[in-house]
Image (tube, rainbow, N blue to C red):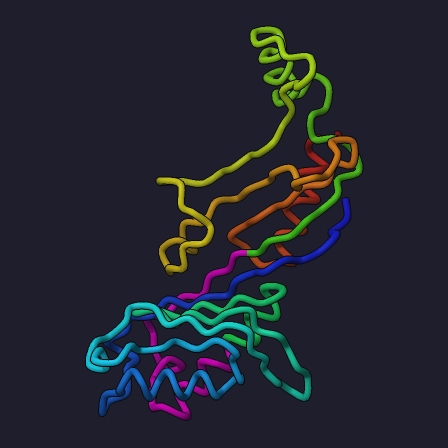
Amino acid sequence: MKMIVAMQSIAAISVLSDTVMPENGLLQQDLINFVGDLYNFAVKPQIPPGMAGQVFPVLLYQAGKATINDSTYPINQIAVVQNGDIVTASSTEVADLILDDFLSKLDSGLGYKIGASKHKKKMYVSNMVVQFDRPIEQPDSLISKIGNLLDKKIPRPEKPFNLKRLAFGSGDFTMAQVITIEAIENADFIIERRAAADYSENIYFSSAPATTSEHLKILAQIEDEILN
């Protein structure tokens, strides 16, 4: 198995908001300006005229870049939500680096107390495209048997039943684009055929509530279990 490309992945932190807010309070517009300038985001939240006093539950910043330890990292998105912060970047390792830098600057620049909080938890979602050495639908495997059964019961020679998607998780299905701490916390483990890739290429998209490096290890172990 080999990874073809790491795709947009997430590092997030959940916090108990009441315990980390600046002691003297903070105007949301000041937060918007501070974060927008921090990483030179091309897209920043906009508060419509006449709504300056309202608190918006999600602030989205897109297309920025962070310079950390003399290296520059593109930022796909930062979401500031009421119970945490969510960073999307090329891999969970990069997103985690940006998240740590972001939280440190919120503390030092705006008076947040995230670093000292005892009520915080990090979580990750990694996405990648991989190529397995051989098909997942091995002969005599459960997946292959289900496909063969469907082919017999629902004859469709021109469009046989092959594996398209496997998902493991708990609770209700959550759309991937939902940007909440809860959605990240309950993210599914997914393996699905990469769109437009021929079945013979064994190319899959995979998403996991794990770091990019741990995700790769899990996929390698799945391949070993299936192919052996």
211 or 78, nearer to the observer: 78
Q: Position of 47 compared to 167: left or right?
A: left
The residue drawn where x is 62% and y is 85% is 67
The residue drawn where x is 36% and y is 90% is 110
45 or 118, nearer to the observer: 45
The location of residue 191, given as percent across then percent down, is 60, 40
Q: Quadrant of the C terminus?
A: top right
Residue 83 visible in the picture: no
Q: Position of 19 compared to 132: left or right?
A: left
The residue drawn where x is 61% and y is 71% is 94
Q: Position of 177 compared to 214: left or right?
A: left
Residue 176, magenta (yes or no): no
The residue drawn where x is 62% and y is 20% is 161
The location of residue 159, given as percent across then percent down, is 66, 19
Q: Quadrant of the N terminus?
A: top right
Residue 102, magenta (yes or no): yes
Residue 24 falls in image quadrant: bottom left
48 or 150, nearer to the observer: 48
Q: Which residues are magenta?
A: 100-125
The location of residue 197, given as percent across then percent down, is 72, 39
